[in-house]
Image (tube, rainbow, N blue to C red):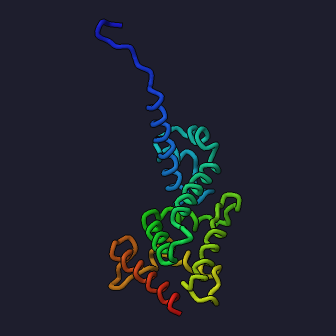
Amino acid sequence: MTATSRPRRSPDPQDRRRDAERSRQALLSAALDEFSEKGFDGARIQDIAARAGVNKQLIAYYFGGKENLYREIQRNWQQREAAMTDPALPLKQVADRYLAAGFAEPRAARLMAWHGLTGGDPELNIDSADTDLDNLRRARDRGEFPAELDPEFLRTALLAIVSAPVIFPQAAQGPGGIRPGSPEFENWYRDQLRTLLGRLAAE
């Protein structure tokens, strides 16, 4: 060691934690890209790691493998849903939140579509149907849609409406030919959904 050289400092524990969290979040984002583009079966560990710019061994280290990585993505979405589905909120406001989340993060809807179309393993699906139905029953009791309209049907219909611009962008079109992906389409689509739910409440 020369007189001007300095001893190498060991990484600070806090720095190591930050690096680990960055790697973990990079893997989650890369995995969501891969799963939403290729489905669970088509996504490969090495491709996820390459997108994240990390060693593929870190998937096993942080998540315990591909299945648990997939589950973690779904748990993260479920946590976001919990913040959107306040049972005290009017149905129009909840629908607004779901629609905004779908426009902001289209990969979640694509992942759900892959899971359904490929007959995905039920063990890899985290469903919020029970919570959604409970909230819809409360909305029905508040008079936000007609009593003869079944909450199970309405949940499916709203799910289709919210996810359609992402799953079927080639079929979704607004006035003047505006397409999903533009602010004009999102504003128009949101207004149309509000109008529909307002009409239901007026029935």
Q: Is residue 168 visible?
A: no
Q: Is residue 143 visible?
A: yes
* Residue at 60%, 53% in the rendered image: 70
Quick one: 172 or 95, which is closer to the camera? 95
Quadrant of image for the N terminus: top left
* Residue at 55%, 45% in the rendered image: 46
- Across and down, in percent, residue 90 comes to 50, 76
Residue 143 quadrant: bottom right
Quick one: 184 or 114, which is closer to the camera? 184
Q: In the displayed structure, would residue 80 be above or below residue 196?
A: above
Q: How many marks?
A: 0
Outermost residue, left direction? 4
Q: In the displayed structure, would residue 90 be above or below residue 110?
A: below
Residue 133 quadrant: bottom right
- Across and down, in percent, residue 59 comes to 58, 42
Residue 75 quadrant: bottom right
Quick one: 202 or 150, which is closer to the camera? 202
Q: In the displayed structure, would residue 106 be above or below residue 188?
A: above
- Across and down, in percent, residue 41 comes to 63, 56
Quick one: 187 or 144, which is closer to the camera? 144
* Residue at 55%, 55% in the rendered image: 76
